[in-house]
Image (cartoon, rainbow, N blue to C red):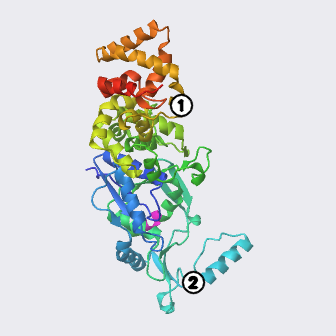
Amino acid sequence: MTTPVVTRFAPSPTGFLHIGGARTALFNWLYARGRDGKFLLRIEDTDRERSTEEATQAILDGLSWLGLDWDGDAVSQHEAMARHAEVANALLDKGRAYKCFSTQEEIAAFREKARADGTSSLFRSPWRNTDAADHPDAPHVIRIKAPQEGQTVIKDAVQGDVIVANTELDDMVLLRSDGTPTYMLAVVVDDHDMGVTHVIRGDDHLINAARQITIYEAMEWDIPVFAHIPLIHGPDGKKLSKRHGALGVEEYRAMGFTPAALRNYLSRLGWSHGDDEVFTTEQAIEWFDFDGIGKAPARLDFKKMESISGNQIAMADDATLMRDIDAYVAENDATKLSATQQSALKTALFCLKDRAKTLGDLLAKAHFVLGERPFTPDEKAAKALDPVSIGILKELTPHLQNASWERDRLEEAVAAFAQAKDLKLGKLAGPLRAALSGRAVSPSVFDMMLVIGREETLARLGDLQA
């Protein structure tokens, strides 16, 4: 019988949901959802000084906005501290861990001498094999007895077999002198207790896997499948940082990227399915597997992100897009769209979706249905509405009054007028666009006329003042 797949995302609540963390969550979610498995969420909040409720909420909000639903309740690592200590003491009882009474000063002196002698600075505790009868009544930590000979093999689903010489492994601390667990212990215990079968995370954790395997083996627990994915770098190939721009998911949300667009882009950031660039989330769930993940760091490409975003907006159904727009407007503290504006916008989506790269871009192009008469033209539109152009539009008005209000008939009417006036259609379209929208950039003038209707079109032309 095949063991059900269980993945997890385990962020530290010390700040926003990082774009790299969002991709890790996405990969875990895709892998689980594609195999009818479970995707769990664990908040690694053992660092009490840095962990905040605000950061935890930001992570939950970011995942929810991205559409990455998790199974069950989010788990707090801090709340399992007693369980972590129980495992540390179990290892002590099994002889696979020991009490270490070395002070910080003694450890520092050991490392200083090792550097001076040109030997390994990995701390080798003198308490590893000391009889318990010789232990002092003093503060101590509990350390794992790491193997000192041979090698540890990390069977990684992305990196392949990674071999680590056991001489490179130290007897890491499991339980601090104040009784609190270290991250290295807590993560293994939590993954085991939560039934995690696949640990998908950044390759900056690769060396941690070798150290964590020593705990799995000492406890005689099943080792999960490890899949360490390359990190995301900036466009310049360097580690992603503030200088590259937005780092948090909420920043991309505020910039007008839709959840579907960010899911699509992030899934392509380090993973591929042939030459497919734009695809649905359902396709990503079906296709995602480890063999499509590359080993080289992925580079953030804002132009590609915008391109994929534009495609996803064009692909979106109107109901989903309207929900995304409402959320975007609320996120940016803009005035909420009225029922009339929402209705008009939904009617206009057919001529807006194919032309927008972000939701902000779409709303800017929707000014012709969101604005109010009389439209005040922007600087570029005002240039198109010189006295001569206004005069021509006033001559066009009677032709539109009598035209059948269908796209083909409107095009014929405007083309016939332009021909009669010996004008190129482009020369007429610019002023007409400016008159109908107050902008130099908008959907097709004929699409706008269809959306706003005959009466409104003629009213806007009537507003023009030479």
Q: What stretch is highlighted in magenta?
A: 212-217
**Mark 2 lies on residue:** 102
> Hey, what amino acid is under mark 2?
Ser
Q: Which mark is on residue 380?
A: 1
Q: Is residue 378 magenta?
A: no
Relative to 435, residue 1 above or below:
below
Relative image position of residue 176 (x, y in whole percent): 48, 79
Relative image position of residue 114 (x, y in whole percent): 69, 74
Relative to 57, residue 117 above or below:
below
Relative to 230, residue 305 above or below:
above
Query: CA–CA distance between discs 2 and 1?
Result: 74 Å
The rendered magenta stretch, by its main secondary structure, is classed as helix
In this rendered view, identify the residue nearer to me: 31 or 11: 11
> Hey, what amino acid is under mark 1?
Lys
Relative image position of residue 322 (x, y in whole percent): 31, 40
Relative image position of residue 180 (x, y in whole percent): 44, 78
Is residue 413 rendered to the left or right of residue 112?
Answer: left
Badge 2: residue crowd in 10 Å (few <14, some 14–19, many ≥20): some
Badge 1: residue crowd in 10 Å (few <14, some 14–19, many ≥20): few
Label tally:
2
In this rendered view, identify the residue nearer to me: 411 or 187: 411
In this rendered view, identify the residue nearer to me: 349 or 149: 349
Q: Is residue 216 magenta?
A: yes
Instruction: Tell me whether circle 2 and circle 1 mark residues in contact (CB < 8 Å).
Output: no
Residue lying farthest to the front in this orientation: 466
In this rendered view, identify the residue nearer to me: 417 or 131: 417
